[in-house]
Image: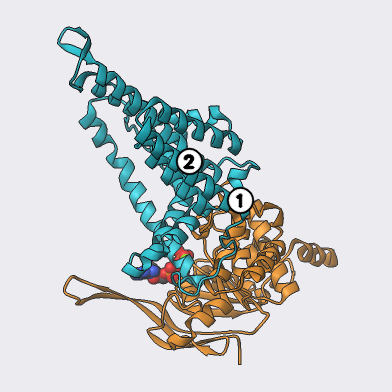
Chain colours: A orange, B cyan
Amino acid sequence: MNFIEARKLVHEYIRRDEDDNVESILTALDEVNLDVKEGEFVAVLGHNGSGKSTLAKHLNVLLKPSGGTLWVNGKDTEDADNLWDIRQSTGMVFQNPDNQIIASVVEEDVAFGPENIGVPTTEIWKRVEKGLKSVGMIQYREHSPNRLSGGQKQRVAIAGVMAMEPKCIVLDEPTAMLDPNGRREVLEAVGQLNKEKGVTVILITHYMEEVIRADRVYVMDNGKVVMQGTPRAIFSQVDTLKSYRLDVPQITLLAYELRNAGVPVPEGILTRQELVEALCRLY
Amino acid sequence: MLRDITIGQYYPADSVIHKLDPRTKLMATMIYILSLFIFRSLAGFAAVTLGLFLVILLSKVPIGYMVKGLKAIVVILLITVVFNLFLTPGETLVSFWKLRITEEGLKNAVFMTVRLIYLILGSSVLTLTTTPNQLTDGLEKSLKPLNKIHVPVHEISMMMSIALRFIPILIEETDKIMKAQLARGADFESGNLVKKAKAMVPLLVPLFISAFRRANDLALAMEARCYHGGEGRTKMKPLKYKGADGIAYLLIAVYFAVVILLRRFL
Ligand SMILES: Nc1ncnc2c1ncn2[C@@H]1O[C@H](COP(=O)(O)OP(=O)(O)OP(=O)(O)O)[C@@H](O)[C@H]1O
Ligand SMILES: [Mg+2]
């Protein structure tokens, strides 16, 4: 069984008036199918309001499906007994670094998760150290989070999730509020966790460049999964992506425009290196 | 202006006082505050002064740094002095115009001022030598018995530590909103009190909205990290009494006894 399996997952936000009558229904997830294997790096793309965050919150059982089924780590999210197991096995990192750090000292924040699940004290210390080392923040363990940069705060948040020893991390636009440096730091940390520790990563993002290192990409629009495949396969369909109000990475766009102008470069070029090589082969 | 607030600030240093268990320090502070309202003679005054300054010395926090914290209460001090000086009935010392200063008034004014100053100094020893987290941990553990009468002790201490973490963030945000509104032509300075209060509305509304959003986000983040109240929770840094705490409790008891005896017999 896959680590995450969603079948025809539906979520409706229902707005009620004062008398509890349904005022309006917004279908934020519309029969979504999602399969993620253990150790995979999956990216989710989509325009604003396409339902990405709603999907992410389901993976951690912060929201319950209105229809369909969702299995995480072999457990049905519908069953209340599985709640803490699932939250421990699937950690979540949110967009705003300030609003997810709870303690006033970095190491104490990282300890928050393990404390909640009742890990013994000596083990907590080991996990905190391991978590902070895995994102390269160990030298800041006694600092106040308020004095860290956005990228560093976000890495502390990731360390806090790692200290719960999850199998999977879901990151909901973790770089949206960061500068380019912070973005690079965070992505590198995430990439490393995936490669070296085999942690399953689900990265929700707006930035096309961040998607390139993923194994697979899901594209969402209006609550539906509208495309899925490898980054190369996705980015070779420039026109389709544009119809979902998404851009492609600049290099891919350049290659696309070159093709349109009659230069025979291959489809789905992702990096500068690839474009250079393709062009050199031509001339 | 907002940045001058020093309450709840921690002054890192390597001292005996810093190393004491927060519960010991909480108890000591309470006893000290109590003693401030017990003493009434010069000998008692000497005892509370000696007690305070010995502890400050031991804490290795510069006195100047502590005195800075008094700035916040200057106004209150002045009001106390004025009221006590002029409104206490008794033997007239001096009088001019319609006001008169009495002997009792003078004595009251001096003692109240000393009490207030020592109160602030004494409690700032606690906050300066104890990290906010230790403090809330200490409170949580000291108040645990109240759990039996359904006081949500863990929740209160969690709220306090979150508040302490977010105060600087919200202050920064207030600054930002203030500047944004100033750039739009808002005027927070001129006009009478009513006008000034009205000028605060465009500041408070966005601040509240943002605070609620933060609270919502934080609640989600805490839940995602398996937070479900105090039950079954372990601690990274559990509180443990050490030898020094025993000695400290003994000294506190001796101090308290001395202050009480001085009130009775001197
Ligand atoms: N708590 C809520 N109550 C009602 N509607 C909501 C709620 N949260 C989200 N929605 C709506 O559900 C839809 C999907 O929202 P969601 O936050 O999942 O999108 P998103 O893809 O994460 O967008 P963004 O890129 O802006 O983060 C949107 O139309 C949004 O307005
Ligand atoms: Mg979102």
Badge nearest the viewer, 1 or 2:
2
Which residue is farthest front? B265
Whether B98 is drawn above or below B74: the answer is above
Residue B147 at x, y = what percent? 37, 67
Write down which quadrant ligand 1 falls in. Answer: bottom left
Label 1 with label 2: CB-CB less than 8 Å: no
Give the residue type that dot 2 points to. Answer: Tyr
Res. B255 mark: 2
Answer yes or no: is residue B132 visible: no
Quadrant placement of the C terminus of chain A: bottom right
Q: Quadrant of residue B106?
A: top left
Whether B68 is drawn above or below B144: the answer is above
For disc 2, the chain is B
Residue A279 at x, y = what percent? 80, 64
Give the residue type that dot 1 points to. Answer: Ala
Residue B161 at x, y = what percent? 46, 55
Residue located at (50% from left, 48% from top): B25
The Cα–Cα distance between marks 1 and 2, rounded to whole angstroms, is: 16 Å
Whether B22 is drawn above or below A233: the answer is above
Residue located at (43% from left, 85% from top): A80
Q: Quadrant of residue A22?
A: bottom left
Task: Answer with mark 1 or mark 2, whichever residue precedes in sequence.
Answer: 1
In this figure, which residue is indicated by the disc labeled 1? B244
Answer yes or no: is residue B195 visible: yes
Dots 1 and 2 on the same chain: yes
Quadrant placement of the N terminus of chain A: bottom right
Residue located at (52% from left, 50% from top): B249
Q: Secondary structure at mark 1?
A: helix
